[in-house]
Each structure stands twice: as structure tokens, then as C-alpha cells.
Amino acid sequence: MSTSRKDDLIVVAGAGGFIAGALVRYLAERGFTRLRAVDKKPLPEWYQRSPGVECLCLDLSDEANCRRACQDASEVYNLAADMGGMGFIERFRIECLRSILINTHMIEAAYRAGAQRYFFSSSACVYNTDLQKDPQVRALKESDAYPAMAERGYGWEKLMSEMFCQEYWHERGMKTAIARFHNVYGPYGTWDGGREKAPAAICRKVIEAKDRGADSLEIWGDGNQTRSFMYIDDCTRGIDLIMHCDELIATPINLGSSELVSINELVSVAEEIGGVKLKRHYDLDAPQGVAGRNSDNTMIQGILGWHPDTPLRVGLAKTYAWIEQQYMDRKAGKRTVS
């Protein structure tokens, strides 16, 4: 493992969003004093902001903005992308594909700026969809991305951007890191509006049902789809470890929990936290993604001696409490994160 100096300039792209915003906070809490956070959203719409951090509102699909963002950077973490939960990435494939502009411009700008390390946030959506047709899917290992048959739109953009990271190391010698995220959730994430992922959406639906006195909620699909869900604190820790491990340069690696649960089980956990039991209505025409997906953590455990291990029940309780407060604040007319 190598470490950065506390006064190195670190750039985090996509910092107005959920994961990157948490990453900025993680770095600030560890004493890094020169942090530059970049996002195209206006500052009032950022999910969270950390004191003392330089904040730039820039659209990173534009090359000139990437050069400005990366100026003097020692490390660059690129988590900027146009994305959301399954409802978004299945309906807006072109927007997802256009995120390749962000990575191509950002990695070149980081290289030209002399950055020592570059992190790219990839996704489990790169994996061959033929291996994910059964809810009782075997855990996906890193080599399962090839032969390639990624999720249309979002998955293909991530897979191509991984290749850029690998070639910038092999051809130009810039140290790159590639983490394939598996369903990250937690406080300060999207919980309403169409871009939210399953844990936040389920928590919100349970909270809404309780508040309105309803006795049921809607589930996308038949509820038998399976996933693993990684708590945000595990994600930020994993990013740090992967970024600074020389054994993982230009090497895609899973960053996700291996705790496989069905959507029905996820709903049951949320109901238990909320102290309620609801009838379930299944929308079989709604976006539902692959039948099953889980993270094989053999590689990350072997190389780092660590893997994401926050139990779903623990992480979801914290997430539920935060979303419930957001819901009540919105109901009271206060400004909230959407």
C-alpha cells in the first residue's frame, strides 16, 4: 500500500452525488486538506458538502471543464456519471452511454495534469448477462466480464471505460484503479424521483405506507430477483484501499457485499425496521434488471485482506432512519435531498 500526503490536491468528480459526496467526507475526515469537489449540479442541489472543500460546478462531459477540474491534481477519483437505479438505466440508455465522454476527457486531463493515480468507478453491470438469469446465481468473479455481454447502455459504457484505464497504465504509465460497484446504499443517497435504487425505494415505500395508513406496497418484478447490497461506509473504505494498492493497478476488482438477498427479503427487512407488515403487489411490467447478481469477494479478500461486511440489517436501519427524517422534513415543507 502507498499513501498520499495530506496536502496533496485530490479531485473527486461527481461529488454532488451520493457516493462521491461520501468519499469527499471520508477524505476530509482523514485529514486531507486540499480537496476539490466537482459536479454539474448547482451547489444547493448537492447531496452533501464538507467544510473547507473547494467546490466547482462543471459539466465534465466537456473537455475544457475536465482540464480545469484536474489542474494540479495528485489524485483523481472519477465517480461522475449520468445514472440511477434500474428504472433509470433501463429507460435512458443513451444518457448512460454518453457518460463515456466524462471518462475519456477526465482520464486524459488527469494524465496531462500529471496526476499520480486515477480511480474509475465501474459497475457490476459490466458482467455477462447470460450468467445472471437465475435468482440463485453463483457469485460473479472478475473474469466473468468476458466474453462481453454487458447490460445495454450503462454496462457497456463502464466496460469500455475500464479499458481506457487499463491502456493509460500500459501505454502511458499512469496508475489507474478500477472498482466494480455492487448496489451501494446508505444515508445521503437518492431516495425519490426515479433514480433511487432498490434499498432506498423500498424504505421510502414502507415509510409512505405507514404515514398514509396504507396496507400494501408495490414491488417491481416478482420479488424473487436477488442482489447483494453494499453499505456506503464499506464503499468509501474500499475505494481508498483499492486506489492505493499497487497490486491492483489497472485491474478491475469487485467492490460489493457477498450477502445475497431477494427483493422480497429486502422488503421484509425494511418492514421489520419500520414495525409494519404490508401486502405486496407485484408489477411484472416494471424494470427489474437481471434475475440475480452477487459479488465474488475471493480476489479482494486475497489481495487486501478485507471485504465489505456491514450486514444488510445494520446498514438498512441507518438508511431507513435517514430517509424517514427526509420524508418528514419534506412533508413539513423543508428542503431535502431527493
Image: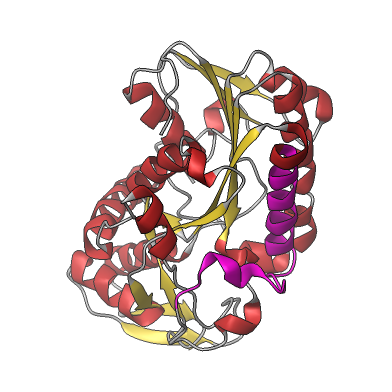
In this view, the residue in front, 4 or 64, is: 4
Q: Report whether residue 335 is seen.
A: no
Q: Which residues are magenta?
A: 139-168
- Res 114 quadrant in image: top right
Magenta stretch: includes residue 199: no
Task: Work out whether 142 lies above or below 99.
Answer: below
In this view, the residue in front, 112 or 1, is: 1
Q: Position of residue 28 (x, y in %)?
A: 38, 22
Q: Report whether residue 142 is seen.
A: yes
- Res 89 quadrant in image: bottom right
Q: Position of residue 148 (x, y in %)?
A: 72, 71
In this view, the residue in front, 80 or 45, is: 80
Tell me how the rendering is colored.
Answer: secondary structure
Task: Work out whether 334 lies above or below 146.
Answer: above
Task: Work out whether 40 lies above or below 141.
Answer: above
Q: Identify the residue at horizontal 40%, vertical 78% (top origin).
A: 263
For the N terminus, the image quarter is: top left
Determine the main secondary structure of the stretch shown in magenta.
helix
In this view, the residue in front, 298 or 336, is: 298
Q: Position of residue 138 (x, y in %)?
A: 45, 81
Q: Identify the residue at horizontal 40%, vertical 27% (top origin).
A: 27
Magenta stretch: includes residue 150: yes
